[in-house]
Amino acid sequence: MIRRYSFGHPFQTDAVVKDLPPIHGPVPYFTVENDDCTLACPLSSDTIVYGLGETVRGINKRGWHYCSNCSDEPQHTEGKQSLYASDNFLLLAGKGQMFGVFLDYPGKVDYDIGYTNMNHMAVTVGNADYDLYIIEGKSAEEIVHQFRGLIGRSYIAPKWAFGYGQSRWSYYSEDEVREVVQKHRENHVPLDMVYLDIDYMDHYKDFTLNDETFPDFAEFVQEMRRQNIHLVPIIDAGVKQERGYDVCDEGLENGYFCKKEDGTPFVGAVWPGKAYFPDFLNPEVRAWFGGKYRFLLDKGIDGFWNDMNEPALFYSEDGLKAAFAEMKKLEGKNLDMDKVNYFRELVTGLSNNPKDYESFYHNCGGKRVRHDKIHNLYGYNMTRSAGEAFEKYCPNKRVLMFSRSSMVGMHRYGGVWTGDNCSWWSHLLLEIQMMPSLNMCGFLYSGADIGGFGDNATADLLLRWTAFGVFTPLMRNHSALGTRCQEVYRFPEVLPVFRNLIGIRYALLPYLYSEYMKATLQDTMYFKPLAFVYPQDEDAARVQDQLMLGDELMVTPVYTQNAVGRTVYLPEPMKLVRMHSAQEIQTEQMEKGYHYIPIALDEIVFFLRSDRMIPLAKGGESVPEVDFGDLTLLVNVQHCAAYQYYSDDGCSKDYDNAKNRTCITMKADGTVSAEGQLPVKLDVKR
Amino acid sequence: MIRRYSFGHPFQTDAVVKDLPPIHGPVPYFTVENDDCTLACPLSSDTIVYGLGETVRGINKRGWHYCSNCSDEPQHTEGKQSLYASDNFLLLAGKGQMFGVFLDYPGKVDYDIGYTNMNHMAVTVGNADYDLYIIEGKSAEEIVHQFRGLIGRSYIAPKWAFGYGQSRWSYYSEDEVREVVQKHRENHVPLDMVYLDIDYMDHYKDFTLNDETFPDFAEFVQEMRRQNIHLVPIIDAGVKQERGYDVCDEGLENGYFCKKEDGTPFVGAVWPGKAYFPDFLNPEVRAWFGGKYRFLLDKGIDGFWNDMNEPALFYSEDGLKAAFAEMKKLEGKNLDMDKVNYFRELVTGLSNNPKDYESFYHNCGGKRVRHDKIHNLYGYNMTRSAGEAFEKYCPNKRVLMFSRSSMVGMHRYGGVWTGDNCSWWSHLLLEIQMMPSLNMCGFLYSGADIGGFGDNATADLLLRWTAFGVFTPLMRNHSALGTRCQEVYRFPEVLPVFRNLIGIRYALLPYLYSEYMKATLQDTMYFKPLAFVYPQDEDAARVQDQLMLGDELMVTPVYTQNAVGRTVYLPEPMKLVRMHSAQEIQTEQMEKGYHYIPIALDEIVFFLRSDRMIPLAKGGESVPEVDFGDLTLLVNVQHCAAYQYYSDDGCSKDYDNAKNRTCITMKADGTVSAEGQLPVKLDVKR
């Protein structure tokens, strides 16, 4: 059951798709304090707090203070309070507490989850204008399912986007891209996508191309497609200030950019220096900017990633002027601790400065709204702008889209990558822990930059990260300018291992894609905490480094350098599956309980639940090469098992067609049958 | 066996105390490349690389590139290459490889330990002027023991320094210190030390006092001592530029500060702004600066911490001028990505700029030596300056001394704290992993800032960190300006738990102090990796989050938020000891192997090896209250056991006297006896 409580005058965020009448009366579970701005409740000692989507720390969010405030934050350390997203959904699960809560509010939200006092939670908004949804259900899964119904069906990516992608800031030219593709193909490392970072553009101008380095882009896109490669270019939020550049000119002429109090356009700097920021909250602006994606769609592009849309600001025009003026006062002075800190802060504080977010405005149905009041809607509505355009211009075609900044609501228009992580082992663990939290909030097509974006990767880190990345819907290796190159062929001593690990992804694709599609179509989770599946198991409840995947698997990644294995908790007897390649599979029956499992760098280990089976393909070096109809069942069946297999053409939106489904069953005597309109050829690996 | 190989003209660092004749002939194990600047060797797949003292990452240093380059580095993330120390000792241990290597070299050393290629190591110096020591032995322990003999006996702290200390940047006045002491005493939380950070001084001037906030310091020191509290002030490397300030005046008059190429004193900025840097490599300067500690010794102070001695530089006078000139060129320009990065770097790059370290010189026996060539000797020789003075002015009294920057050699003059860590769970793990590495290099009196220095601590982090801190020789809670206050009484909901955990430290003191003293006197390790004790056990070899303590214990800290226990590997049957307070002890026999052990926030768990026992005291609220002669033996004896118990007056240097030792034995029939000159009263907890 979902109950809506309404405070003040909520801003229409379109995060939810169901129009529930608000209830007048006391809010259950919480004490409403601080002029309706704070919701407070005690935390029982055994209560686990789930949620908040993309943020720092563990699956259990207890013991920290978080802030929903979409931030261009390149250092995802434990001390941070905000990353790029604002996902205001929490789920409290304990013996004495079991409910979900969603705050539909577009500004900053502070969460004190046992930070000030271990046994107390407080959620605080800046203005008491919000909708509060209290969600009750018998189980965590049921509560999440209801919440997902409330916010609407998640974005669905094309099937080819489940291949392996290679990215770098930047591949500067056609030839660099060709080399990446060639190196993968000649080494038989599967590949489906190459990403283009900011340097494919002409001077970082959205919807332009560098004609020198990509002289015939449409033809190049086709050349790549003939090799089963999709090029996926980046789009930034800021529009370069340059007269004669169509996007800039049209935006200025029509008043489409965010404005300062005096009505002139706000100028902030990003990659090209001074830039304007489209007012994505205005449907007219969304339609205009979304239409611009056709520049690339028309050249054969069918996927994008939206970046810098918190929006990130290197500085504002006004802020930079003020900083220079202040710095002059310090020249020639003896700068002691306080003055030197002030001096540093003048410069480092220019980026993403809260004062700048308070200095510009949106036009919301004729009403002027200051940006900081609705800050968390910006990236969401940039991606919505694209999504609405795709719906209009290619209504029955899936376009790949994922975004850096996001908020619940955006999940209907795109997936997310988890932003500018680092080549740190702790960030591999962070990704593992973020995945179920993102899934709860509707973000299913998601993943982190494998190997890490900032800092330098090592071969072993990339191997372990790839071994987990095999299971994430978005599987992309990406790294930053100035860091060690981390394409898998940069590590020749283990290149055959990478070939095998990524090959395993392609063998698993029928299962992974089927689970992803069912999760989107049925409002369920792809990755789940163990506690969601084994709610009575107190040991399972505390596990924060293993994940349930679909209804069949448990994944147990290694995320510690120089480890040769790890401890795994099995909440029930399972079959250990050890894969060295798509073809080499060993299995072993394991008992419930704690086990130390050796897991070498050259293998992927996962666990198959009792009376379950999963379909494997024979493999391939790109998604089109994978035969989703020629399956090998990997089984762990003591009594009988059934698997709902979903597959489709991968590009149209004909998701709900019955011909996409087949029910595969296995009886106690080992006989296998398939019932449904989706034809499959089956063999069994026991 | 230790062999010395000499290249070029090594700088006399005094890191080693034995004068071995150099061997002429090929260096074993390594290929010497790159004009003698690089030592390269393959790494066998099972080889574990230990060493490097204070640096990032795990006990096994494989899979990263490190750099010995003492750095004021406040962000101890995985991507860093250097922290505050330079400990050029490595130990390679595997089936096919077993040797130690020490590079006696005072400049930058690069270590590529399986970074470029997983199976290859390379050690590179800037100039081929160094002594190389190759150490062979049958075991890791034996190699470390030989190395420690080579570098000389470690600094020995007074017994009171094994109490619990409370620190903060800063307690600004006598009254603030009184409040800290009172809060501990009234809540019966043991306490022996309060640390004074930079604000006790007059304008950050070494060897001065703020007369307003500490009006009668000598009397205040005595007032604290009457409550069994030692005040421990900080001393910084930089000397404020201020005419009329004796340290500045004398240094300038005598030419005691480091000089630029033109012979004028180098000016860099730290807390007070512009400052000079004593040339600690000059024995005359060491004698002069060391003598200055008497200003505080004469007021009753008997402990210090030396800080900012990498040396840290906020900026240099010349560097700041140049930065301002460059910044002017950017004013009014459209700063795009490259220009804005350059602008930021102008300011952020001012601190600890390598160019500044290349711009000043030392006077080494009349020879001018550029700082960067001997950079890693600076903090070492600042602390040596103090140590030599203490030896002169109070020859038979132990003075507490630990330093931020260090290098092998300094271990004879002081301990270390591990610098400006953060309130991160990953930094609790980092401390656990640093401890044995530091011990190998001779740093026994050591510990991290419990609860973390930077960022904000939570109650649970502080509880878990305190539970590990109970075992580290230096046990200090310290935090930075601007962060959440983290004295234990700031967390009233768990204050009784802190009282009990810290109380357990005091009950363990007879054992911990005895093990610390034996480790210093016998050149052994206090904390050891499991592999050192169980070299044949392949599982033990891979454990990086448990430590052996002394010859009796294994500690297994919890370092994961919201965990209610952890997996522990037992290389042999042991007795699990679970303490809720000094008085409440439960034990349980455990088998060899992997176990999941519940460990709640309010308890300390450790393991006692077979046929071992440890002495416990009855407790106390300060070290003088602990009766080191009234002992309870905690035993795990199947056959028989012996424990070499060491205790002494705790303040003199009469370490080697036989009256400090007693051998306690327990026979199979349970009878206990003590033989030795140290009188003890014994009872047994079984």
Image (cartoon, coloured by chain):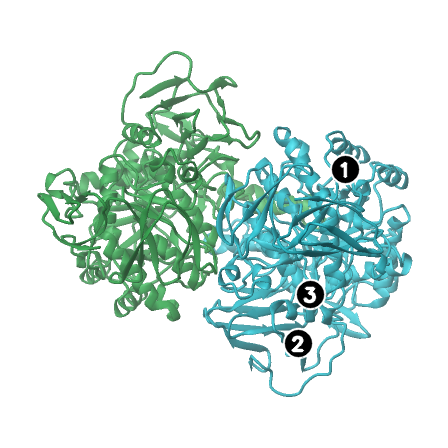
Chain colours: A green, B cyan
- Look at label 2 and name its amino acid: Tyr
Label 3 to label 2, Cα distance in Å?
18 Å
- Mark nearer the viewer, 1 or 3: 1
Q: Check disc 2 and report the residue beneath it.
A: B133
Q: Which mark is residue B621?
A: 1
Secondary element under disc 1, as helix, strand or loop, is loop
Quadrant housing the C terminus of chain B = top right
Q: Is residue A388 above or below residue B55?
A: above
Residue B141 appearing in the image: yes
Residue, disc 3: B376
Mark 1 vs mark 2, foreground winner is: 1
- Is B667 in front, or is A425? B667
Which chain does the numbered disc 1 sit on?
Answer: B
Q: Where A229 sits versus A329, above or below?
A: below
Asked which quadrant contains residue B24, the reply is: bottom right
Q: Residue under mark 3: which chain is it in?
A: B
| Alpha carbon separation for disc pair 1 and 3 | 39 Å
